[in-house]
Structure formats: C-alpha cells, structure tokens
Amino acid sequence: MSVSTGTAHFRSVHDAVEYYRPYGYEDVKYAVECKLRDGEIHIGRPSVKPGESLRIDEDGRYWIKED
C-alpha cells in the first residue's frame, strides 16, 4: 500500500496564494510572504528519498508518495 503525504512546498508563489485564499486571511499575499520568510512554506520541489516520488495536486502543492 502506498502512502501520500502533503508537503509545505508549492510550485509557485501564485499557487501558495491561491491555496491559502479560502482560509480567510485579510491580506493573503502578505500572509504567504510571512510564511515564506518564516520557513513555514517553500517554493519549488522538495527533495525525495529513494523509494519516494512526487506529485502535484490541482492546487500546485507537492505531495510525496512512498512507493
């Protein structure tokens, strides 16, 4: 059985903003900038270990699948 785990990595800043938009932030762009600055989220592909693979969901968020 394979398991997928969501990561804090997004394909782009735009994808991160769109992902967090429904969360009710007063200024979602500023909230994403703060999350990036604080290391809470990241832009770009995460590294994977042997036996893992990446996928991107419709929100531009990376997921790691353990094969």
Image (tube, rainbow, N blue to C red):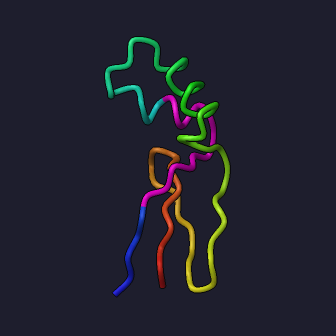
Residue sitting at the far top? 26
Task: Answer left or right for 53 relative to 58.
Answer: right
| Residue at image point 39% right, 12% down | 26
Q: Quadrant of the N terminus?
A: bottom left
> Which is nearer the eye, 31 or 56?
31
| Residue at image point 52% right, 36% down | 16
Rendered position, 29 above or below 18: above
Which percent across, then down, holds residue 37? 64, 31
Rendered position, 46 above or below 13: below
Which percent across, then down, holds residue 20? 42, 31
> Which is nearer the eye, 22 or 46?
46
Which percent across, then down, holds residue 2? 38, 82
Rendered position, 52 above or below 37: below
Magenta includes 62? no
> Hey, which quadrant is residue 46 in on the image?
bottom right
| Residue at image point 42% right, 65% down | 5
Q: Which residues are magenta?
A: 6-17
> Which is nearer the eye, 63 or 36?
36
| Residue at image point 43% right, 36% down | 19
Give the number of marks.
0
> Hey, which quadrant is residue 3 in on the image?
bottom left
Task: Answer left or right for 16 relative to 50.
Answer: left
Rendered position, 56 above or below 25: below
